[in-house]
Image: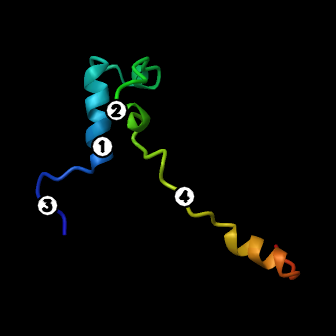
Amino acid sequence: MKLPGFKPLLRVIREKCIDCMCGYVLEVKKCPSEDCPLWPYRMGHNPYKVKARKDTAEEAETENGSTVSE
């Protein structure tokens, strides 16, 4: 269920960073304020989230000795 007016937190953080850089989107990447608590999230993604790898099943098959056909 989506609430009216709801924005994902990472989008809100990204918009705050753009506002902090006076609207210059490209300057957000160059932000020098590494002590800001929002700095790791400024590009609109969570750097601490572990991504699921697509090739995990392929690695498991390789470890078991079976081959992966392409």
User: For the residues carrying marks 1 and 4, which lies nearer the camera in this image?
Assistant: 4
Q: Secondary structure at mark 4?
A: loop
- The amino acid sitting under disc 1 is Arg
Q: Residue 60: percent from the left, percent from the top?
A: 75, 76
Q: Residue 35: percent from the left, percent from the top?
A: 39, 24
Residue hosting label 4: 51
What quarter of the picture does the C terminus occupy?
A: bottom right
Q: Which residue: 35% across, 26% down? A: 36
Q: Residue 43: percent from the left, percent from the top?
A: 42, 36
Residue hosting label 2: 37
In primary-sequence order, the first of circles 4 and 2 is 2
- The amino acid sitting under disc 2 is Pro
Decide: few, some or many residues near mark 2? Use Cα within 10 Å; few <14, some 14-19, many ≥20. few
Give the Cα separation between the discs numbered 3 and 2. Answer: 26 Å
Q: Secondary structure at mark 2?
A: loop
Residue hosting label 1: 11
In primary-sequence order, the first of circles 1 and 4 is 1
Give the Cα separation between the discs numbered 4 and 3. Answer: 27 Å
Is residue 69 visible from the viewing direction of this image? no
Residue hosting label 3: 3
Q: Which residue: 34% across, 34% down? A: 38
Decide: few, some or many residues near mark 4? Use Cα within 10 Å; few <14, some 14-19, many ≥20. few
Q: How many marks?
A: 4
Give the Cα separation between the discs numbered 4 and 2. Answer: 22 Å
User: For the residues carrying marks 4 and 2, which lies nearer the camera in this image?
Assistant: 2
- What is the number of the mark on residue 31? none
Q: Which residue: 25% across, 24% down? A: 19
In primary-sequence order, the first of circles 3 and 1 is 3
Decide: few, some or many residues near mark 3? Use Cα within 10 Å; few <14, some 14-19, many ≥20. few
In primary-sequence order, the first of circles 1 and 2 is 1
In primary-sequence order, the first of circles 3 and 2 is 3
Residue 27, above or below 63: above
